[in-house]
Amino acid sequence: MATAQDASAIADIYAPYVRDTVISFEAEPPTAQQIEARLSATLVRFPWLVALACDRVVGYAYAGPHRTREAYRWSADVSLYLDESVHRRGYGRRLYTGLLEILGAQGYVNAYAGIALPNAASVGLHEALGFTHVGTFTQVGFKAGAWRDVGWWHRPLVDPPASPAEPRPWSGLPDSVLAAALR
């Protein structure tokens, strides 16, 4: 589980995605303080997880609200970023699997992921984890001198209940649920 002490490592992992790619649509890499504020703002409702290798944070995955209107509160957007040194070594799959299990246990019904296209590695990971493509916003963002498309992928987390309970804070989940998700 990510903590405020992980903010600097998270910022370091994320910076190259902002600076050197079109994967993130941010223009400037956020500082560790900005990452810590983002983490603190959503941490009660949504999980942030980190992957460690040799006691070093090498990746992170997190969830946030899908949209702000009340009827969307059972859906979450998910994101994953890895240090280049651990690409294609299973860290992304383990992080996302844990994140999705926790979201389902909280009572979230749907997970959505936006992927700047083209990005075969991200599309492959999401589809391997049960996400399906639901649409593409064409030329929705302008970065690095060109208009970029963003595809959206969806994964059901649980069967939609007829009368859903409010999603629970993830920090209040039983230890057994968290332990199973973070194995």
Image: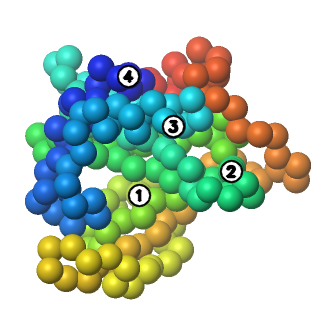
Across the whole image, how many numbered discs are drawn on residues? 4
Which of the marked residues, 4 or 3, is nearer the chain's N terminus? 4
Asked if the residue at tag 1 contacts the one at tag 4, i.e. Cβ–Cβ closer than 8 Å, the answer is no
Residue type of the residue flagged with mark 2:
Arg
Which residue is at 51% across, 53% downward? 77
The disc at residue 3 is 4
> Which residue matches tag 2?
73
Left or right, residue 77 beside residue 15? right
Residue 35: image location, x then y, percent: 32, 37
Which of the marked residues, 2 or 4, is nearer the chain's N terminus? 4
- Assign a secondary structure to mark 1: helix
Left or right, residue 52 beside residue 94? left
- Assign a secondary structure to mark 2: loop
Q: Is residue 159 positioned above or below 100 on the image?
A: below
Which of the marked residues, 4 or 1, is nearer the chain's N terminus? 4
Residue 156 in view, yes or no: no
Are there few (<14), some (14-19), or many (20+) residues within 10 Å of tag 1? Answer: many
Q: Nearer the viewer, residue 9 or 34?
A: 34
Residue type of the residue flagged with mark 3:
Thr
Are there few (<14), some (14-19), or many (20+) residues within 10 Å of tag 2? Answer: some
The span from disc 1 to disc 3 (Cα, nearest Å) is 23 Å
> Which residue matches tag 1?
126
Which of the marked residues, 2 or 3, is nearer the chain's N terminus? 3
Residue type of the residue flagged with mark 4:
Thr
